[in-house]
Amino acid sequence: MLRSIIRSSLKSRLVIVVATLLVLLVGAGRLRHMPVDILPEFSLPYVEIQTESLGLSAEEVEQLITLGMEQDLLNGVPWVRTIRSESMAGLSSIVLVFEPGTDIMRARQMVSERMTQAVALPHVSKPPTMLQPLSATSRVMVVGLSSKTLSLIQMSMLARWTIAPRLMGVPGVANVAIWGQRDRQLQVQVDPERLREKGVPLSSVLETTGNALWVSSLSFVEASTPGTGGFIDTPNQRLGIRHILPIVSAAGLAQVPVEGSSHALGDVASVVEDHQPLIGDALTRNGPGLLLVIEKFPGANTLEVTRGVENAFAELQPGLPGVETDPTVFRPADFIEAAVRNLGAALLLGLLLVALAIVLFFSDWRPAVVTLLSILMSLFASALLLCLTGTTMSTIAMTGLLIAIGLVASHSVVDVVNITRRLRESLEQGRAESPLEILSNSMLESRGAMIYAALIVFLAVTPVLFAEGISGAFYRPMAVACGLAVLAAFLVSLTVTPALAALLLAGPPARPRIPAIVTWIQWLHERLLPALVRRRGLVLAGIGGLALVALVLLPSLDRSLMPWFKERDMVIDLRCIPGTSQPEMTRIVGRVCGELGSIPGVRNVGAHIGRAVRGDRVVDVNSATVLVKMEPRVDYGRTAAAIQEVVDGYPGVHHTVSTYLRDKSSDVIPEPEDEVVVRIYGDEANVLQRQAAAVSRALSGVRDVGDTKIIAPVQQPTLEIEVDLEAARRHGLKPGNVRRSAAALLSGIQVGSLFEEQKVFDVVVWSTPPTRQNLSNVRNLWIDTPGGGHVLLGEVAKVRIGPTASVIRHEAVKRYIDVVVGVEGRDRESVAADIEKQIRGIPFPLEYHAAVLRGHETPDVVRDRLLVFGIAAAVGIFFLLQAAFGSWGFAGLAFLSLPASLAGGVVAAAATGNGLSLGTVAGLLAVFGVASGGMVVLIHPCRRGESAVDPSPGDEPSVRGASGRVPAVLLVAITTALALAPALFLGDVPGLEVARPMEIVVLGGLLTTLLILVFLVPAMLPGPGAGREDRS
Amino acid sequence: MKRGIRWALGAGLLASMPLVGCGKEAVPVTEEDHKPAKVEHLRGPEPARITLTSRAVMRLGIQTAPARDEVVEGTVRAVVPYSAVLYDTGGGTWLYTNPSPGVYVRRQVTVDRIRVGQAFLLEGPKAGTAVVVVGAAELFGSETEFEEE
């Protein structure tokens, strides 16, 4: 079958060349739009549902909102793996995580259907929103807005009504969240003391305000049915009737007469323009401002989205006078652009070096051109195949392609070297064959060998494809890219290489010269090999020794598989003690930002505190994120250390300094190996605490268990108002009355909406700020009684401070508490098994139970699965080698030589302190590819029981014959080494974080590989004269 | 030893990546050497004593004001600004006094009522004692390792 394909490629060479050009043209267009990002899409499919309920406490959010939705949603959505939720003051967030491989769009449809059936939520929150699907590295840009002339409320209006909608229209933008947003509201702020003096009940103010407007959401107010304008028909014309609201400002609303009283609204309350209570805030380098966080869809191209957003801002700028937009607060596109530039430069230089080497090797431009063009076409085809599978071109995918460079090169080089050799021999021996005949035979020969090499590399990377979960999704693009590259190289060698060879090499024979290297290698072999052949035992021992070195050193390397990207965007998480107020957070974060901004080397600082509507930070106001951007050319280590030193210097402010990519990819790191977590599920906090203590005590007796630690939800102080039924009854009050009055005064009630210029504003009845500023004032709130009297809140209710959980977390619809047990001595699995046995003996109350957390990604599970697949792959490789060589002996030799070839790479990694990083692994795989290709090329002709295609000295299944095949291997090794060599000279710059350690390992590994392939393995082949006559 | 052999088999034969356990990263970790605050937990009515470096005091922007006495309805009450008062989860009220530069001591007080940004205390520090009015939340935070899940 291969023969017929090669034959047809040779015959239709012009067609193939034209087709190739077409593919290049069309493919280039496709590749330009390939999504490019640093990390692949690795998050499991998930859906997040957020429900905003400003003013509701964590417990009420849990009871009124979260539980209802969870219980409905859990029972029915297919493909759900876990359901988790967080209830905190003002927000309910429910996350449904789906099984890997679930189609996210269908999953979202299922959830949507369920949401329409969700129980009708109490009228205390906005409707639940299913957030847009987001990429794993979701934030694509953060833009700061500040102004010297406009107020924050005016800027919020611009942001909400003009800027955000325009940005949402940029292709790829999934969400725009605005931190620091202050919605313009008309507020009727009452002072209960003043109301009491004027004898006006709070309910009158509510009704008046509601009825003054066109539309009110309060069902007990007449304006809830606004009525329509209508129209009249004159004999000639139809005139529609339009009512124009005269109230456009606070002054207008203040003139409205209060129902049941002679006063105007402005006499009994202050009617002002103000904003809603804040759930978060933002700081730019110019002080208070807004931060717009722009997030992208999965698979969107960060660079394209960034440019789209910047263009949108350029268009908007004329309409935003006085507003300073700062799109550089956080811009990952900077890093991507630098990385693409540097890696592109390195690869281009590498390509030039490779071209030089190939030309020097062949000393004849024609075979050099054929080889180079095939290599380039294979690389292009692999990138195109990768693009067609919809993969993002990430660092991981790029690493996969780099690994395959050696393989890709080996296919082309082996083919062309074989062709030139056969052509030369045919000429020298004066055989009467057509050049095409020679080409066909030699290509079939080399293809027959290389197919085994390709399959071996396939097998070596397949275990990665079977890795599950987040780590699997993270590293899978590497295996996919490598596999596709091998496939592409094979296809190209069956189509393009024969066509090019037929065009360039089959012409009138200009006597092809023997490359100088070939003569040199033969000279070396004649000198050294006889000595080695005499000491075959030593040679075998040598190979075995190298293999041992590799296998022993490998596990001792530090494992750190996440590359440390030199991002210039740092992300600092700050947390003050739970319960810290927003003004205090703004103050202290402002001080931190001010100091960070003064560090030389820091270009820009921005911060966002707390939350924003539809934001990606589900935190309370005591948490803040500071975004620091470094100058591109300053000393990275020194600036990072200075930043760390500043942040460390603020006591009481807990902090984590990281970069965005590191933050996001921390999900990929599996759980630590020296801890077992026991999770206890239940309903009530104090019962859970008791059970946790009981479990902790019971587990301390288990063998090899170290410290136990209970992780309970963090508590913060909260103001509790509990109505005293007896006292309330005496005044004729019901608990509900007390709540509603207090709610209107302390939290504010939206009574209606104001429509103006295509915008909608809330009209709110609230209390004056001094009324709600301290505990005493809360106690002294006047509550209206049914009889027209008043009573202080403190007289009908207990007003006190009590504890509350800052965030109430659920897993599988239940609250939980964790007991973390340290493991010392035995391995985690067996201790976990003992712990499980122990737990079964502990009594739990009804509806409480405990389970040992077994993530789907525990190190033991991952390692065992990898081991199984690894051993299967190794066995497969052995059998492939046996099939390739037709001899168990040769298979064993090759099987031993493969890890031996890696020895140099492992030593290089250990010596340079790189450890087992992604670059090291990629380098080892690349060396493995070269070694397996070389092994196959060297030994394949030695297979027994097969008639050689064309007997020639090069076919000798012997030491002598090997001399003829070694040059191809040497060229492959040189090509692989040179392709990435520029990475070492360009320095430690963005984009080369993986390429540099990879190149170091490749250089080291190729040294041992060449040693083995050029000297040691040929020495192990059957002695001279084992098959055919010697060439004199 | 058994583990070593398993590893050698698995990892060495393949040269494919062990996806297991990314080791310790080079993420800069907060060093415990030059802490800006030293916290001593004591027994009795003043359960915490925090000593800050002068740099830390400047960074936090701590400001103090003297407690004073005021006559309210015939009795003398200690008065401090409301911004000095901190609530704990049990409802207890505390503030920080500043007996010497850089030293802050947490002390319990009982609040009678709050008016116009001033807290009138039933039990509080003597008149003239410096109390922290800006930065008390951060001092409170430095006392505990509040565990965030």
Image (cartoon, coloured by chain):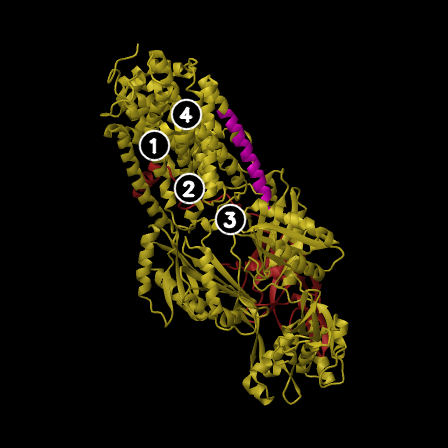
Chain colours: A yellow, B red
- Say which residue label 2 marks: A480
A272 in relation to A299, above or below: below
Q: Quadrant of the C terminus of chain A?
A: top left
Amino acid type shown at disc 2? Val
Q: Residue at x 48, y 22 (%)?
A: A357
User: Quick one: label 4 or label 3, which is nearer the N terminus?
Assistant: 3
User: What are the residue bounds of the magenta stretch?
Assistant: A331-354
Q: Position of residue A601 (x, y in %)?
A: 65, 42
At mark 2, the secondary structure is helix
Query: Do pointers 4 and 3 mark residues of a single chain?
Result: yes
Other-residue count near label 4 (Cα within 10 Å), few / some / many at <14 / 14–19 / ≥20: many
The residue under the point 34% across, 35% down is A455
- Disc 1: which residue: A451
Q: In the displayed orientation, state which residue is furthest to the front.
A: A235
Q: CA distance from mark 4 to mark 2?
A: 24 Å
Q: Are marks 4 and 2 in contact (CB under 8 Å)?
A: no
Name the one closer to the observer, A827 or A430. A430
Q: Which residue is mark 4?
A: A413
First of labels 1, 4 by sequence position:
4
- Chain designation of label 4: A
Q: Nearer the viewer, residue B98 or A327?
A: A327
SS at mark 3?
loop
State the separation of the CA atoms marked 2 and 3. Answer: 17 Å
Q: Pick the residue in front: A678 or A465.
A: A465
